[in-house]
C-alpha cells in the first residue's frame, strides 16, 4: 500500500467516493492538497461550499469541525459539508492540534502564533455533566447543544 493513501480514511461507507478525509500525524509532512486533487464532483452546491471553505480557511487556517459549522451556519447541510471539507483541509490525529482541520499547505508547527488553536482533550465524569446541565438549564454534550459556548465561573466550555 502506498504511503500517500494510507492516510485517506473513508468517512462515508455507503458512498466510498464521497467524504474521503485526509488524516495525518503531527510528524508527517504537510500535504499541499488532497491526494485526489480538487473537489471532483459536478455538484453546484458542493462547488460553492468548497469555495466558501477555502475563503474561510484563508482567514483562519486551523479550525475544529464545530467552529466551521458555526461560522458557515450549516444546520441541515452537514452531509454536503462532510464531503467537501476533506478537499480543503487535512485533519491531524495526534499532538497538540489533534482533531482540528488545517488548510492544505499550512504547517501549524512552523508558526508560533498557531498555539491558540491547540486543543486539549479530556473526559468529564457524568456527574459533572449533570451538574453543568442543571446550571445552564439544557442538555450539554452530544449533538443537542453542538457548538454552544457555556461560561462556568470563568471556564469556557464548548461541547
Image (cartoon, rainbow, N blue to C red):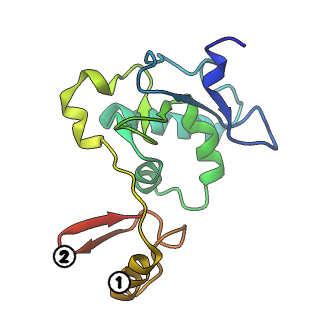
Crowd around label 1: few <14 · some 14–19 · many ≥20 (10 Å): few
Q: What secondary structure is found at the residue carrying circle 2?
A: loop
Q: What secondary structure is found at the residue carrying circle 1?
A: helix
Q: Position of residue 76 (x, y in %)?
A: 61, 61
**Would you place residue 157 above or below residue 87 in this image?**
below
Q: Please tell me in which quadrant of the rendered image residue 37 appears.
A: top right
**Would you place residue 151 above or below residue 115 in this image?**
below
Residue located at (32% from left, 38% from top): 60
Which of the two discs, 2 and 1, sits closer to the camera?
A: 2
Q: Quadrant of the N terminus?
A: top right
Kindly give the residue lying farthest to the top in the view shown.
2
Left or right of 66? Residue 76 is right
Between 49 and 121, the one nearer to me in the picture: 121
Q: CA distance from mark 2 to mark 1?
A: 12 Å
Left or right of 150? Residue 27 is right
Between 157 and 16, the one nearer to me in the picture: 157
**Would you place residue 128 above or below residue 27 in this image?**
below
Between 109 and 124, the one nearer to me in the picture: 124
Residue located at (48% from left, 31% from top): 89
Q: Are discs 2 and 1 less than 8 Å apart at CB? A: no
Q: Position of residue 14 (x, y in %)?
A: 82, 44
Q: How many marks?
A: 2
Left or right of 64? Residue 151 is left
| Label annotation for residue 32 | none
Residue located at (65% from left, 21% from top): 6
| Label annotation for residue 153 | 2
Q: Upstream in the sequence, badge 2 or badge 1? A: 1
Q: Please tell me in which quadrant of the rendered image residue 106 appears.
A: top left
Residue behind mark 1:
136
**Would you place residue 12 above or below residue 32 in this image?**
below
Q: Position of residue 115 (x, y in %)?
A: 23, 37
Crowd around label 2: few <14 · some 14–19 · many ≥20 (10 Å): few
Amino acid at each position: 500500500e502506498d504511503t500517500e493513501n494510507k492516510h485517506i480514511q473513508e468517512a462515508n461507507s455507503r458512498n466510498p467516493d464521497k467524504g474521503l478525509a485526509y488524516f495525518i500525524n503531527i510528524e508527517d509532512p504537510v500535504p499541499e492538497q488532497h491526494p485526489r486533487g480538487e473537489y471532483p464532483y459536478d455538484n453546484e452546491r458542493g462547488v460553492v461550499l468548497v469555495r466558501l471553505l477555502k475563503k474561510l480557511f484563508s482567514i483562519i487556517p486551523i479550525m475544529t469541525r464545530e467552529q466551521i459549522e458555526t461560522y458557515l451556519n450549516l444546520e441541515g447541510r452537514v452531509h454536503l459539508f462532510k464531503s467537501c471539507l476533506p478537499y480543503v483541509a487535512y485533519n491531524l490525529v495526534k499532538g497538540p492540534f489533534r482533531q482540528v482541520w488545517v488548510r492544505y499547505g499550512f504547517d501549524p508547527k512552523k508558526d508560533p502564533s498557531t498555539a491558540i488553536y491547540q486543543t486539549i482533550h479530556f473526559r468529564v465524569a457524568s456527574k459533572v455533566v449533570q451538574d453543568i446541565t442543571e446550571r445552564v438549564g439544557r442538555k450539554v454534550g452530544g449533538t443537542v447543544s453542538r457548538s454552544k459556548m457555556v461560561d462556568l465561573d470563568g471556564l469556557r466550555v464548548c461541547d
